[in-house]
Image: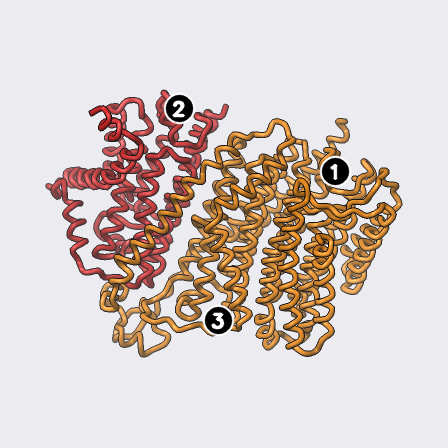
Amino acid sequence: MTEAMLFCLLGLPLICGTLAWLVKSSLLRNALIVFSALAVAVCGVALVVLSAQAPDGVWSFAVAPKFEWIGSVLEAVMVAVILIVAIKIRNTWIILMGIAQLLMVIGCYFIKPAEHHELLLFQIDNLSRILLLVTCIVGSTILVFAIGYMKQHQHHAPPGAGSLGRFFFFFIGFLGFMVGLVASNNLSFFSFFWEATTLCSYALIGQDGGEARRVNATRALLINSFGGTLLILGVLLIKLQVGGESFAELIQNNTLTLVPAVLLCVAAFTKSALFPFQSWLLGAMVAPTPVSAMLHSATMVKAGVYLVMRITPGFYDQKAMLLLAFAGALTFVGGALLACTQSNAKKVLAYSTISNLGLIVACAGLNTPLAYAAGLAIISFHAISKGLLFLCVGNIEQKIGSRDIEVMDGLLYKMPFTAWVTLLGMMSMLLPPFGMLLSKWLAIEATIRSPLLFIFMVIGSALTVFFWAKWIGRMQNIGYHEHIPREQMAPSVRLALSIMAFLVIGTGVCTMWIFVHFFSPMAKQVFSGHEGVNWQTFNEAKEFFYPAMLIFGAMLISMVIYYFTFWRRFRPSNVRLPFLCGENVDMDQLSEAKDVRSYDFHSIYDRVEHTVISSMYLRGIISEEKSTRWLNWLAWLIIIALVGLSIASIANR
Amino acid sequence: MEKLIEILTSKHVMTASAAILAPVAGALIMGIDRKLTARMQGRLGPPLLQPFYDLFKLFGKEPIALHRPQIMYAVLHLVFMILVLILLMAGQDLLMILLVHAFSSICLILGAMSVRSPYSWLGSQRKILQILAYEPILLVLILAINLRDNSFLASKVMENTQPLLISMPLLFLAFVCVLAIELSKSPFDVATSHHAHQEIVKGLTLEYSGPFLGILEIAHFYEIAIFFGLIMCFWHTNIWIALLLESAVFVFLLVVDNAFSRLSAGWMVRYMWTVPLTLALANLIWLWS
């Protein structure tokens, strides 16, 4: 039964995607998409529930060793496809890396592996289950959103844009590949799915055609091919050294040697767009919004942090771990800092994603149970909130034709539903009682033994508050309206936003419960066999249940007080215009002219002057370009140190 | 009789009474503040209980606002400020308390940003900078406490028999700067001010009036009480020394307030991230070694 679910999840998206590409009728295509979204969500949940029944919670799928060639062939085919694409777009670097990859894959195939009785193709444990849930639920909701969004998008699409069928083929297929990636235990299967997600993201970023898309798609392919090359090199080294080819063996036997481990980590950096590889994710926002939502929340970037979290418990070198944590922390601070300087909503979201991915890697690098649990929590909560936010920004952009944050004021009146949901999403990124705040605070507590990291965390969190608060403030800026009209929107868009908002609220209400009952036992299980683990902070963290409830209670109490004492008693006659030294426009002018706002004022001859208030973007203090250069330099420094350290460890042996 | 005393000194009753008495204490401190400031400027000054009179008058006024959400943020600001006090009294995790306090401040900012008023908007942007300026110092303070007592719990600080001031004198100086920002004293009163006109009128709280301004005032009383309580925690072993320390800080802040004019928000961030933060980090480093 469990196998059936897994193969459904792997096969269905590809089949449905192909069918969606082939059919001409849009009604049929939409039906196919809805069907695949439902199927992915149902099968995903079923797979998670079923696999959790297995002994020790680890379910695996084994075949006879003679089938080993399948993985290598699949991998070689995928690498060859990327190579063909590279030749088509005539990019020398990608071609060179493609050839190198192909050679290594062939080399890998001819290395005689250690003796096996059976080949563990797939294995699903707690970490995989979390990623599965994220991919299947968030991913299929984005799929539903894409139906309404892409219909509208195709009306305004530039000439040369790909067809809707092509889009949905890669879009649905992406989900299947991602499921395969988190479920596979065999390294050649893993590399196959890794390359497949690279290819999908290349195709989706280039969807709309045109120069800007071509450049950005090529950049994404280039950086991810670099990562793929490192990954395959790491796999090759692992095979050469220990003959193993599955994660399970590597981690259980502690045979993960430093060089391949570091190579895998750097590969994960490229996929997760950590500094200095962030440029591809920033460029990816030229794609239609559902693609960004998919890349940022449910798939792609999560694959990188998944790989890091998968291998770090098997890492035994403290120095390397510390460097890894620094690489993550640097990205956390850098991403948050650059997000403060942006007024482009999608760019703010992109930098915020990068920053959070850095935080996850930092958590993995800390290698304590508390940090690990925090990392798991961030992966799941971030996926939901960020998915929601991207969908909202996409919807807003379609309506108002801009993605500039400063234009988003008064949206609570113009598109109340979307605006409320967006506010909810933003608040879930930094305010209590939502999960992101809890996880961030756990991460901070976990860094206590390394003060330098602590300072990084502190500055990063302060900056995070800065850019979110600015945006929330701008979104909810509104004049007084007694009645707010209902917002018109496509049913699939409304449905997708509602589902995501429901998920955000649900996980927000149960944050502490989820943490105590799921994430913390998972972390305990991972670290139970290890020595010298700091359990003190981990156990203290469980005491947070009581104060977290207090916060929740305070929230409810204030809402009740507010409702009964103020909301109900408030009358339109209590409303006044803002203070402008008595030179306000009057109420009549406000209702007559459309472009007059309540903070505009009279100058000489009763002429109406428009007030423009902007938030702070630190212009002239921090320039994106210069900071990026410095941050990239620092990040390269850390990566080179990491690689150097790992090579030195061989020499020392 | 003994039972009665036991009940009265139990943790919950202490917490509850602190939550009720704190705003009174805060208002009294503010009354003294006004009186002393007036004397320094050669004026007679208002009566000691003036903050109470002001407050009662505010609640008697017509409730005027720009729209409804604005009021919600004022209520949230107050409730979470009270929660900070309760968590502190219960000896909870200091990091969490700091986050709750930050949330309370953010509610104030969002309330000011929700209305379409340029002055209030400017004030809120400056308040964000204020938070950015003092938050790192408070976090370093918490880190230092953790290094000393090996725990984030506030109750552990009280159990240690050595006063905090002895191990962290430089952090204390940095904390005094934070206090000056929190109480909006010159030269840091960029977001809103107790003094007469500034260039952004009343800034952050400009668009609140009547009972809603009253709510913010009560929250401010709580904040004063909390921060002065924290000063006393630097010498918790002896109440008289603690009071002496507190009065010294109080008078110092007043002198500085009257001697300086308000400076810009950018200057404030630069100053806080250089002088006090360096002091705090230096203290941290020597605790570490």
What kind of element bears circle 2?
Answer: helix
What kind of element bears circle 3?
Answer: helix
How busy is the neighbourhood of tag 3: few (under 14 within 10 Å), some, or many (20 plus)?
some
Q: What residue type is labelled 2?
A: Ser
User: Height in image: A133 above or below A546?
Assistant: below
Contact (CB < 8 A) between labels 2 and 3?
Answer: no
Q: Position of residue B15 (x, y in %)?
A: 29, 36
How busy is the neighbourhood of tag 1: few (under 14 within 10 Å), some, or many (20 plus)?
some
Using the rendered image, report if marks 2 and 3 lie on a common chain.
Answer: no
- In space, the residues marked 1 and 3 are separated at their CA atoms by 52 Å
Name the residue furthest top: B161
The residue that appears at 71% across and 67% down in the rendered structure is A16
Quadrant of the snapshot with the N terminus of chain A = bottom right
Q: Give the colour of chain A.
A: orange
Disc 3: which residue: A400
Q: Which of A287 and B125 is in front in this view?
A: A287
Which disc, if any, is residue B167? 2
How busy is the neighbourhood of tag 2: few (under 14 within 10 Å), some, or many (20 plus)?
some
Quadrant of the snapshot with the C terminus of chain A = top right
